[in-house]
Image (spheres, rainbow, N blue to C red):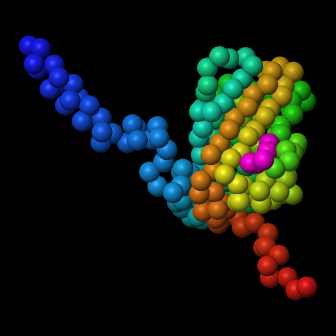
Amino acid sequence: MRSILPVQFALLLSACAGDASIHGILGPQSGSVWKIDQKEDSIAGLPTATAWIRTLNSTSSGSWDSRPVVLQLMCFKGSPIVRLHFQHRVGANRSATVAYRFDQKTGRDVSATFLPDFKTIIVEEKSEVEQFLSELTSSSRLLVRITSLYAGRTTAEFALTGAPDAIAAAYAPCPLKPETAGKRA
């Protein structure tokens, strides 16, 4: 009986070697950790797209555990927006602030809207979205902080591998303003 246990353990361990979730712990297998969904709107017949990335690297003053947070790039009513979704309440429009920092760059406060679930934050002001995306393109890390009178302090940190491809795919249906590369001096 004892001689069978090591064999069973080896078989169990080798079965896990092919499991993608085990490899996911060490990081993505491809160059991008973003999930990109492009399809046609079944009602309007127009192309739709979204790109999102999830992190478990989050903290909340109201909780001891780390909960998933999703950063999503998408079009809404023909305009680009940035959406953050938390698994717990993080704030409200009149009693919370949202700030972010890419890599070691200077942090920024951002004008954001909290949806009625108090878990979802939308950045939709065009200049704020453009500023966010211009920094996202060349960065490898994003730190987001929400400070709320109701929910305390919440942070989330994202690894941003593959962001330029995610931006291009997510905003193909609602293009961002053209870069200044085409302007003459």
Give the magenta range: 100-104
Horizontal side of 30 relative to 164 (left or right) equals: left
Rendered view: 58 above or below 26: above
- Image location of residue 15, percent across then percent down: 25, 35
| Residue located at (80% from left, 42% from top) | 100
Rendered view: 111 above or below 147: below
Horizontal side of 132 relative to 24 (left or right) equals: right
Residue sitting nearer the eye, 6 or 18 = 6
Furthest toward the top, the residue is: 1
Q: Quadrant of the C terminus?
A: bottom right
- Image location of residue 150, percent across then percent down: 83, 19
Which secondary structure class fits the magenta region best? strand
| Residue located at (63% from left, 57% from top) | 163
**How many numbered marks have been drawn onto this rendered protein structure?**
0
Rendered view: 44 above or below 13: below
* Residue 75: quarter of image: bottom right
Horizontal side of 88 relative to 135 (left or right) equals: left
- Answer whether residue 52 is magenta in the image: no
- Image location of residue 20, percent across then percent down: 37, 42
